Amino acid sequence: METAELRARLAAARSLTVLTGSGISAESGLPTFRGVGGLWRMHRVEDLASPRGFARDPHLVWTWYAERRRAHAGVEPSSAHVALAAIEERVDDFTLATQNVDSLHLRAGSRNVLELHGKMRESRCTICDLRRPLDDVLVEFTRDGVEALRHDCGGMWRPDIVWFGEPLPRAALEAAFDAARRADLMLVVGTSGMVQPAASLATKQCTDAFVVEINPEETALTAHVDASMRARASDVLPDLAG
Ligand code: OAD
């Protein structure tokens, strides 16, 4: 599919849902999860992103998230993030469902953002669910180590990220499924489509929209979408927004 055709579809769209994954943040210089140099190629998921891994070694888990938080703070939203914020201004019913936890869509100015896998800017207590800015916990963790992670209620501070085996935040997930049902156009940008239930948003069980994948590689969703653009997000989205 050519960008001109997608531009025409966008102009005609009344309801647009965009699903993004780590590929859009690769445009800002952050690593993806599964590609060459991907985070899950270099680290064991079960050690760093599971409740059991956290219970076993909270120091290791927080040290890793501290590194990732620093990486997020050190990059800027890309032209692709900025383009999605501009497109939002032109479409009456716009929803951006992201699997990313790096806050780059919000920093780019997107407003109707559903963070399906949580957010790296917040931490929450494992027992009472109280929330605090992640950076506040990090300051104390860097100074006092694991002791700083203990909360008065008996729980521990953890990043507000969805770990493997955990449910997605319910309100965000329901809003994403509603948006997929309403959409007449859907863009799927920079995701391998390997992680459920997020990936299912782009399938015909969840949407009647015309679904366009923007990804330099074939993915698990390619067979389910109506059109694929084998391109980087920054090759397509700024053109579309312009
Ligand atoms: P993956 O690493 O699985 O996939 C990244 C996708 O981005 C691949 O399909 C790449 O081809 C594509 N890509 C790379 N550069 C791109 C570019 N410049 N423009 C467009 N696409 C590009 O990452 P996700 O699909 O986001 O979950 O992974 C889904 C979830 O798995 C993550 O949210 C994370 C992970 O485990 C949690 O942490 C809960």
Image: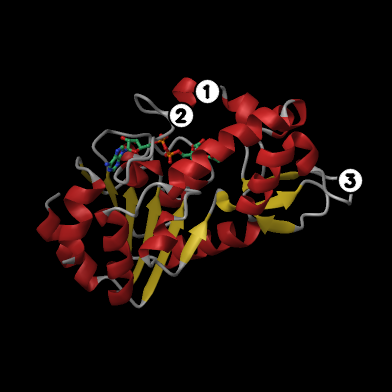
Q: Residue 21: x percent and y percent? A: 40, 45
Element assignment for label 2: helix
Q: In this view, does 124 lie to the left or right of 135?
A: right
Toward the viewer: 144 or 77?
144
Above or below residue 91? Residue 107 is: above
* Residue at numbered disc 3: 154
Please name the residue that numbered disc 1 is placed on. Answer: 43
Q: Identify the secondary structure beneath mark 1.
A: loop
Task: Please state the quadrant of the image where ligand 1 appears.
Answer: top left
User: Which badge, 2 or 3, is on the more N-terminal residue?
Assistant: 2
Give the distance between the C-alpha atoms of the residues marked 1 and 3, in whole angstroms.
29 Å
Residue at label 2? 39
Asked whether the viewer can see residue 11, the reply is yes
Q: Please provide percent x and percent y for residue 158.
A: 70, 44
Q: Bin the neighbour count of mark 2 within 10 Å (Cα to Cα): few under 14, some 14-19, many 20 and up.
A: some
Pointer 2 with pointer 1, Cβ within 8 A: yes
For the residues labelled 1 and 3, say whether their Cβ atoms are less than 8 Å apart: no
Could you tell me which quadrant the C terminus lies in?
bottom left
Local packing at callout 1 (Cα closer than 10 Å; few below 14, some 14-19, many 20+) is few
Which amino acid type corresponds to the residue marked 2 in the rendered image? Leu
Q: Position of residue 229 (x, y in %)?
A: 20, 45
Q: If you read the primary sequence from the N terminus, does the residue marked by circle 1 or circle 3 appear first?
A: 1
Residue at mark 2: C-beta within 8 A of ligand 1:
yes
Asked if the beta carbon under badge 1 is closer than 8 A to the nearest atom of ligand 1, the reply is no
Q: Nearer the viewer, residue 216 or 12?
A: 216
Quadrant of the rendered image containing residue 95: bottom left
SS for tag 3? loop
Figure check: 169 above or below 37? below
